[in-house]
């Protein structure tokens, strides 16, 4: 892992500006509202279990850069899914992981 401090968790809140964007994110999956889990940094909110990738260059575990929650029922990431984006701050390589219920 990098010698740097981990990125602190920064929750992101959706603010759709057009009526089309508002309609897209107007939905939920189970008890979870669309977009409630968007964030930068912190620890991943795994749906299926830990899949933290290792950097293909240095072999160290990568750091969560951010996660993107589903957008609701119309353009969902299969069953309320999430995309996790990881970064190796030593090698500047990224990887992503998709999980869903």
Image (cartoon, rainbow, N blue to C red):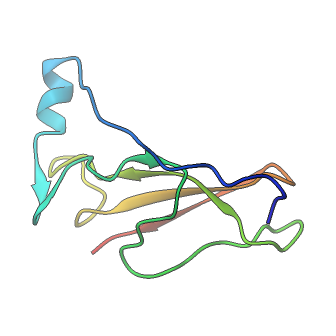
Number of marks present in the image shown: 0
Q: Classify 34 as above or below 99.
A: above
Q: Quadrant of the C terminus?
A: bottom left
In the image, 31: left or right of 96? left
In the image, 3: left or right of 62? right
At x 13% / y 20%, what residue is drawn?
19
Q: Position of residue 92 (x, y in %)?
A: 81, 49
Between residues 93 and 11, which one lies in front from this camera angle?
11
- The answer to which quarter of the image holds residue 58 is bottom right
At x 67% / y 55%, what residue is drawn?
6
Between residues 64 and 56, which one lies in front from this camera angle?
64
At x 44% / y 82%, what residue is drawn?
49
Q: Position of residue 97 (x, y in %)?
A: 53, 65
Q: Quadrant of the N terminus?
A: bottom right
In the image, 65: left or right of 68? right
- The answer to which quarter of the image holds residue 54 is bottom right
Q: Position of residue 57 (x, y in %)?
A: 88, 65
Q: Classify 57 as above or below 37.
A: below
Q: Position of residue 59 (x, y in %)?
A: 84, 74
Identify the residue at the far bottom of this view: 49
Q: Classify 8 as above or below 96.
A: above
At x 42% / y 72%, what residue is drawn?
46
């Amino acid at each position: 892992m990098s010698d740097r401090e981990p990125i602190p968790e920064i929750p992101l809140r959706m603010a759709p500006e057009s009526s089309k964007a508002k309609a897209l994110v107007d939905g939920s999956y189970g008890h979870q509202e669309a977009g409630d889990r968007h964030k930068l940094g912190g620890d991943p909110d795994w749906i299926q279990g830990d899949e933290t990738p290792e950097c293909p260059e240095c072999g160290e575990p990568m750091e969560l850069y951010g996660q993107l929650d589903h957008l609701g029922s119309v353009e969902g990431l299969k069953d309320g899914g999430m995309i996790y984006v990881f970064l190796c701050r030593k090698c500047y390589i990224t990887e992503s992981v998709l999980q869903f219920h």
